[in-house]
Amino acid sequence: MALPFLVGNNFNDPTKTRFHRSQSLGWNNGYALPVTPKTAIGGEPLPVSQLTREELDELANFKPSLTYGQKVQAPPEDFIPAHVGFDKKVLLFLGYFKQTVHESADEYYRVRPVKIYYYLEDDSIAVIEPMVENSGIPQGKLIKRQQLPKDDLGNTWHWKDLNLAINVTLYGKVIRICNCDEWTKEFMASEGIELNRPEEIARDPYTEGRKQPPRSYTTPSEFDKLRQFLVMDRKVLRFYCVWDDRDNMFGEMRPYILHYYLVDDTVEVREVHSANDGRDPFPVLIQRQKLAKDRNATTSSFPRAVLELTEKEISDWFRPSDLMVGRTVTMLGRRFLLYDCDQFTREYYAEKFGVTDFPPVDVADRKGAAPEHVIPPYNGFGSLEDTLQSCLSLIPQPPKKDFIRMLENDNKVLRYSAVMESVRPEDRDRKFIISYRLSDDMMTIYEPPVRNAGMLCGKFLQRTRVQKPGTPTDNPEFYTPGDFCIGARIHIFKHRFIITDADEYVLKYLEANADKFPKETIDSIRQKVGRSSGLGQGNLNGDSGRMDKPEGIKTEYQRRF
């Protein structure tokens, strides 16, 4: 039995003098070659295999299946693809990243918490930031579901690379993983991965600074804000005031209504609009807010351009004691004169301050006589009625027409035959047909075509109303059927025409309305039409204005048209 290996129980061989290790490297043709050592430390022989070459070859060719038969193989397991085995299995990690904030005196960085979803079925990752109401930051899906690159070698992030209390870089954003859900912990433990200790998500310093301190329930006895809300709710002081800005250029006195809300000591100034005052319908001049008596009573370092005034900066605000009938108050640089109030305001001041006398102030603006509306003279452009409409309204409206007259005299036309009176001999033999429309008193002049006349015949004057010469421009007189007697000279735009003949329907129309036209005109046409018909002996059928089939000799105009 060997002695235990204890101090004093070991014996040294005094005859042993070699303690070096055998060389294991040799050199052959300048190359270092390994050499199998045959002796141990001190030159003791190493135990080596005592098998011969034949025994080694027999062991190499030995096959147990030839002796014992084929090994029974286990039945293969069913193959389950990844999208089936890991369907709806998602790892959830909680973390955050820090976003640098530039040019801000209140914060240097912002902590934004995120959720990392790892989908096991295709090794894709999605990063979602929880939505925070009224945060002003685009939140929601930061990185859509995809395989995220891990490095420049083409590797992607795997679930084996994720752990707690580590930093992962996703598209340049360094995200600190702090915690995970229970199912993720169980999955990692089943795969043999030990998770680090979870961490708390860092708090945003700016959000922590904006948190209100716990509400204090010790309120002073003189003022109770909750009692003010319960008692003064829906109680509003109403003052009628004016803003007199006539000291400035184009200034005027404008009425307003001032509302003082007793529930929160806020002030609102509303505009008073009247019909056709020419102003945009904006209802509020000063929106409801607490107004300071002096907005400049702050420290020079207070950034008034970007921050609102609070009770910490200003303590002197407008109170009901500052608003009295007859006083002038300055609000946001405007001076308002309070000249009257409503009945509730009178009762409130009588109960609160003991004021019962509220004499209204007369602020009626004494206006002079309205200037007389003078219509300028007619300038000659367009018709007189159209030009007059531009003087009656800012947006001219088309002149009103007599639709009853237009319906009664529709398609009723009086036709006259006329020749031109001119000093030029080539114009003396020119014949014209003047058509007078009874529906709108407009005239049309047409020149029948004559062969080899050498002149451009056709329409000579389009439909228009013709003014008599010598009549004033502001009150013109126009030609009527009573002026077209046989032999009468008609001046139309510096051209003189002599009436030579008329249609038979003209005589019928004048005789039917003999009380409206001169007798001389009717007699002259009756004498002319009675002897011969210059425009043909056709008659107009009633009020339709259509001609019957003409008989006898036709003129050149009737033959062609």
Image (cartoon, rainbow, N blue to C red):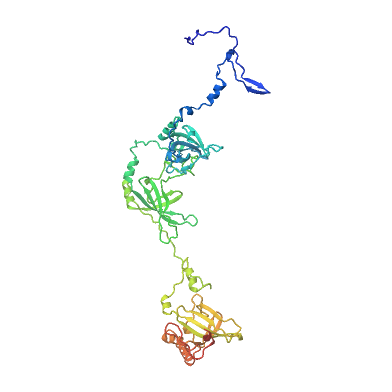
Q: Is residue 204 visible?
A: no
Residue pictured at 60% horizontal, 14% vertical: 20
Q: Is residue 546 above or below residue 222?
A: below
Q: Is residue 66 left or right of residue 261?
A: right
Q: Is residue 314 above or below residue 345?
A: above
Residue pictured at 50% horizontal, 35% vertical: 168
Residue 155 position within the rendered picture, expressed as x and y whole percent measured from the top left: 53, 37
Furthest-bottom residue in this view: 531
Residue pictured at 32% horizontal, 44% vertical: 230
Q: Is residue 364 left or right of residue 58?
A: left
Q: Nearer the viewer, residue 397 or 165?
A: 165
* Figure label count: 0
Q: Is residue 51 left or right of residue 522?
A: right
Q: Nearer the viewer, residue 65 or 19?
A: 65
Q: Nearer the viewer, residue 540 or 131?
A: 131
Furthest-right residue in this view: 29
Residue 221 position within the rendered picture, expressed as x and y whole percent measured from the top left: 33, 37
Residue 470 position within the rendered picture, expressed as x and y whole percent measured from the top left: 52, 80
Residue 321 position within the rendered picture, expressed as x and y whole percent measured from the top left: 37, 46
Q: Is residue 228 visible?
A: yes
Q: Nearer the viewer, residue 310 or 376?
A: 310
